[in-house]
Amino acid sequence: MSVLQQEMRDNMSSVKTFKPKSEADLASMILGGDNFEIIGGGTRAIGKLDAPPRNLLDMTGVSGIIDYEPAEMVMIAKAGTPIADIEKALKKGGQRMVFEPLDYRPLLGTKGKPTIGGAIATNASGPRRFVAGACRDSFLGARFVNGKGDIIKAGGRVMKNVTGLDLIKLLAGSWGTIAPMSEVTFKVVPQVETEATLVLYGISDLDAAKAMASAMATPCEVTGAAHLPQNIAEQFKELDGKSATLLRLEGFEKSVNLRIEKLQAILSDYSEQHVLNDKQTKTVWTSLRDVTPFSDGTQDPVWKISVAPMAGHQLVAEFGPADAYYDWQGGLVWLRLDGDHHVHKVRAAVKKVGGGHATLVRASDEHRRSVSVFQPENPAVAEISKRIRKQFDPLGKFYTGRMG
Amino acid sequence: MTATEMTSETSSGIQMPKPDQAILARREEIVSALKAIVPGEGVVDNETEMRPFETDGFLAYRFMPLAVVLPETTEQIAQVLKYLAQEGVPVIPRGAGTSLSGGAIPQEDAVIVGLSRMIKILDTNYENRTLTVQAGATNLSISDAVASDGFFYAPDPSSQLACSIGGNIGMNSGGAHCLKYGVTTNNLLGVKMVLIDGTVVEIGGEHLDAPGLDLLGIICGSEGQLGIVTEATVRLIAKPAGARPVMFGFDTSEDAGACVADIIGTGIVPVAIEFMDKPAIDICEAFAKAGYPMDVNALLIVEVEGSDEEMDDMLARIVTIAKRHKVKVVKESQSATEAALIWKGRKSAFGATGRIADYICMDGTVPLGQLPHVLNETARIVESYGLRVANVFHAGDGNMHPLILYNINDPIEAQKAEDCGMDLLKLCVDAGGCLTGEHGVGIEKRDLMLYQYTQEDLDQQMAVRAAFDPEWILNPSKVFPFEARGNERPATGNA
Amino acid sequence: MQTNFSLAQLADPGVAEAEKILRSCVHCGFCTATCPTYVTLGNELDSPRGRIYLMKDMLENDRPADEDTVKHIDRCLSCLSCMTTCPSGVHYMHLVDHARVHIEETYKRPFINRMTRNMLTRILPYRDRFAFATRLSVLGKPFASLFDKVTPLKPIAAMLRLAPSKIYGKTEFTSPGSFKPEKQTQGRVTILTGCAQPALDAGINKATIELLNRVGVEVVLPEGEGCCGALVHHMGKEHQALESAKNNVRIWHEEIEKNGLDAIIVTTSGCGTTIKDYGFMLRNDAEWAERAAKVSSLAMDISEYLVLKELPAPNDTGEMVIAYHAACSLQHGQQVKSPPKDLLKAAGFKVKEAPESHLCCGSAGTYNIMQPEIAGQLRERKVKNIESTKPQAIAAGNIGCLTQIGSGTDIPTVHTIKLLNWAYGGEKPEELSNIL
């Protein structure tokens, strides 16, 4: 939700903010109310604006870590717990979230503290997604309240669990459209000793796609593969101004060094090589994760596009010289465009390169009202999704249209 | 028919719904309609030939199907489903029939739709690291097809030699190596699926994540109740430079359990940590002759990966930890052949148990910290029934596999074994875990679902199920206990 | 798995044995994955697990065999790949042998099928009849496609196609006698002369005897030895099989008693599996059990025997690339896996193993005659796999495989022993005359 919209909402007396303090609170509020928009820290103002403002269901009051056992590699927290609190606790336990939840604040200019519930509800995954899984892959269990006010438990606290339907997968990435979560359980992994990045300078988008594919075909365990065309790479003081293909390695120091050497030998065709140290690696990859290259303070459209890794550069080529960079070995394209007239072109390009999906993560409110922000589903799939939503929220109390 | 009217077809504990007489009466008509869709030997309809389809890997329970159909194309499956849904005839999807929870066990008024003739690999793309395969292909056939090019498909259930990828998706199968690589849902990129009305949908593909609700996520592990997956696109992973299983022998299960927790607590996540107790070691050694240490009471197989230097480094760290827990034997595999034997023994553990007794295999998962407690309690409970147990399981993720040994030809002992199994599963739930880590609920654990979930929890699951299959045609007697269904959720298609 | 046999049924030792085997099966399904017919046809009924279930049902209910059960049992190659795979140790071979006897006793096959089977059992096990029939069939070869047009006659077409263009008569190496090494004798063995093999390729016996003599082993071919009985055994003709077995047990046991034998060497692995099973086949016959067990314990594949012997330095054979085809009877039936490969490598050959080496080539005794379509598909698959290793020649330890594979490829096929004999001083196998 944009700042502007927040102000509009605050000015409307008919719209209220509900701030439950507990799961029981949440259930009774849902039972008694209607027309909700679920928010955590309010940092992910993404989605279709489909209706007049709604009652805010502010989950930040349901906050706090419930259980954390490093030896079990599991954390249980209330959904409104700030990510920062979680990261602090994990640091103490020598662990981290493998899915690197991306923080939309720089890109969207939102304020507030991102919450774990928000990260999960938006399936916010970082650069490691293409090898270590999305946020949803670390997500083990949840308690949530459906539109009827029932408190439901799904999943559990163990890594392997196939007991019944895997409902939590529907919650992850549902953008608050089917039910608010009160409590989440997720897998955490040991912190790595060190990380480093092998940089290949000055190669084209196509060659970068090939180089990244070659790197991924080796046993070097690359955990980040991104390519920055020159106009993007120029923004990083850690890089030398040419286009940069980045391959991240993590682990015990000795092992990382060995693997960097091996990778350098395998990619010796690309002669301009450079290695970023641990600190530089952290800075650069956090920046790529949070899309800071496009954090320009504007509302210019920014698209997040997921396609097959080798299709990424083909997609960007459809836009001529474009403001774009690649993550996930080329399968994730961050694309900045200069006006509101590109929607059809983006969708057509995705289709042309073999399919995938594109989300308009940043746009003006007006733009968000007039176009579909998320990738339209094919009719048969859309029909199933519609029925599923209805099963969580039969009376349509939640912001169902947001994913339109 | 309501839940209370359902009666058992066998004398044992798990009930199946009374077959729908109207369907049985139309058998000939249904069979000839199926034959018109799938020609040749694709429809099995005489009693002798249907008999081998009456059960799967959970062979304590057996029910005859109405007919068996073995299609060769997605199009045929679409026509079959459309027809059977119109007729209200229950459908039992079947992959390789290796389910340990009875996921592929039919019922008398149901048609089995088997995927065993759809085994082709359709596309392999090493640059995108994806492979598309028909759902009847075996799990191992994927890794075999890409091995010489340096790739593999990660989920490796012990039955990977035989089990199908479609079945893996149905049960969200795991395996020994999922500690590092995840289970099926983490390695599945897309499916082609036939919905109950015959519509064919494609969900996901070579790209990552879903644009809308994560339907792929809900399909994976849905035990054949949402549709029939006919093709799957999976993620390939580059093979590690090397892999080395190392055996650590301990005097007690407690030492071994504590060692596992310590390894992971220290920040080391090996590719796999497998546990075997003494009976399991004896059984596996008898089959595989892998050189398992025979003078210990608990064995951990810890696998590390990487270059030789990396593995040496990692192993040194693990050995240091193991010494803190009074490790008695440390034995490294000396060659690829030896490593293969160690895994062969482990992966054949269930089958090899057949050499000494009948067994039922439990599959509960517990939080790692609870392992020593649960192992002790398991021993106590099994002993209280006067039975024996062999424990072999994935210790790294707390997925227990106690094998309760009994004599299936002795009805009293068979009942005891079943009761004992239920107690062990409750123990896992009580310890903060779940009923099943990778084998699925099937019919085996169906009636314990209310022990882990509330009625509301199950109502929500059943509601989502109904979004795909409102008439409960697909695998209707599985997963959800009849007592939790209410009258509006039938256990057969035409009740 | 659970079984339901009455005490009366279990009084029959054959049924009791079958029950014991069925009890060890846990229905895990591992066997399906490595079964050639299941991977070809994709039907549970054509897998070991499905057949075990069909057999169980038939035996438990003491039911005469029916057409459907027979169809699926007949499709079984008896390659025993399932036994290599089975973690539970289910003795499928003994179970299916028992079921085949039951089928033979209780099922009346259609006329032509019966005639074909009878013809095979009356010709193949007899060296002279086989040679004569093969010569005759050369004349019939051009008419093979005519028989193809009538389904029940397809086996005749298959047989005609398989008939070799050259037939060997009796040679000194296939007639009774004794072959002593030039120098001191380090062992004394007999080799199974065989029925079909010497007619199809007399060079196998010759190479075996020459090589054994060269390493100091005396070879004796006693008078009166005959077919091992495997062919009729696999057709369920128990009586005939046991008569063959008894004949050989008698002959060999006399030789053991009289002059002593270190081993009974077999160069056709299909026969080896059966001879090693004589002890089981005659276990309930007090008159024969002990002698049969003795004979079985001495039976060895030639490769098993040779790896135990010290061999001289090999001659240079030009590092020829050899694809080793593991005959099912050797790799599964007898679990002899590495000796042939080890021997070939030690002899200086570059040995390749084809993908899917566990799958049968489709030969399987008379299978390629009785089930020509499935056999053809398996042959195609086998040849494709072997050719992918780009070998100069294909080696195997079983004449049936050599004939079957040879009929589907231009790459020469040759018995392992002939390659070994060449490397250790014998003549170059004639099959390889075109390879420099």
Image (cartoon, helix red, strand yellow):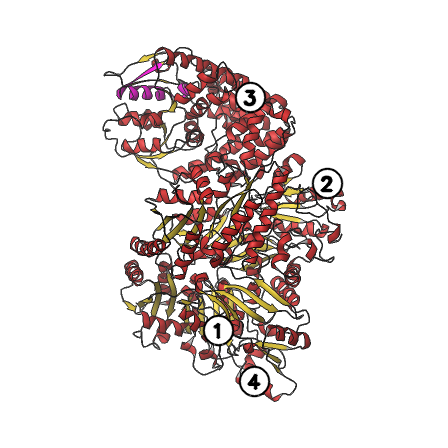
Q: Secondary structure at mark 2?
A: helix
Q: Are marks 3 and 2 on the same chain?
A: no
Read off the chain for label 4. A
Q: As shown in the figure, which amino acid type bears the numbered disc 4?
A: Gln
Residue C307, image x, y percentages:
31, 28
Comparing labels 2 and 4, the label whose residue is closer to the camera: 4
- Of mark 4 and mark 1, the one earlier in the sequence is 4
The residue labelled by disc 2 is B28
Q: Secondary structure at mark 4?
A: helix
Crowding around mark 3 (Cα neighbors within 10 Å: few <14, some 14 to 19, many 20+) is some
**Which disc is residue C117 wearing?**
3
Residue C341, image x, y percentages:
34, 33
Q: Are marks 2 and 1 on the same chain?
A: no
B468 or B328: nearer the viewer: B328
| In magenta stretch: residue C211 | yes
3D distance between C-alphas at marks 4 and 1: 23 Å
**Which disc is residue A303 wearing?**
1
